[in-house]
Image (cartoon, grey):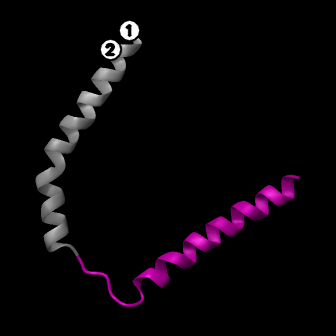
Amino acid sequence: MELFLKIAAAAAIIMLLFYMWPAFRTWQENGPKAEKGDWQAALLPLAAVVGFVVFLILMVR
């Protein structure tokens, strides 16, 4: 039964990828292009989350 579930999950993922491929192509072609400050705007919240998690880990010790 476990093997069947793994095969069914793999088949579902493959079907989902096949179904979403045209939409992905459209999003890549017509999506917004990154500008100069976009990475800096994304890194600031990520760094804040990482810092908060490290802070929580240090508080538990």
* Left or right: 60 in relation to 20: right
Establish if 40 lies above or below 61.
below
Establish if 18 lies above or below 52.
above
* Left or right: 42 in relation to 1: right
**Residue wearing tag 1:** 1
Q: Pick the residue in front: 7 or 42.
A: 7
- Give neighbour class at mark 2: few <14, some 14-19, many 20+ (Cα, 10 Å): few
Q: Which residues are magenta?
A: 32-61
Say which mark, if any, is on residue 4. Answer: 2
Q: Amino acid at mark 2?
A: Phe
Q: How far is mark 2 from mark 1, CA to CA? A: 5 Å
Q: Where does the image place residue 30, in percent across and percent down from the top left?
A: 14, 73
Determine the residue positioned at 83% across, 59% down: 58
Circles 2 and 1, Cβ within 8 Å, touching? The answer is yes
Q: Quadrant of residue 56?
A: bottom right
Determine the residue positioned at 24% across, 78% down: 32
SS state under label 1: loop
Q: Where does the image place residue 29, in percent across and percent down from the top left?
A: 14, 71
Q: Residue most toward the top?
A: 1
Q: Where does the image place residue 61, in percent across and percent down from the top left?
A: 88, 52
Main secondary structure found in the magenta portion:
helix
Establish if 58 lies above or below 9.
below
Q: Amino acid at mark 1?
A: Met
Determine the residue positioned at 27% across, 36% down: 13
Q: Where does the image place residue 34, in percent across and percent down from the top left?
A: 31, 82
Is 51 a magenta residue?
A: yes
SS state under label 2: helix
Determine the residue positioned at 11% across, 54% down: 22
* Left or right: 51 in relation to 36: right
Is 10 a magenta residue?
A: no
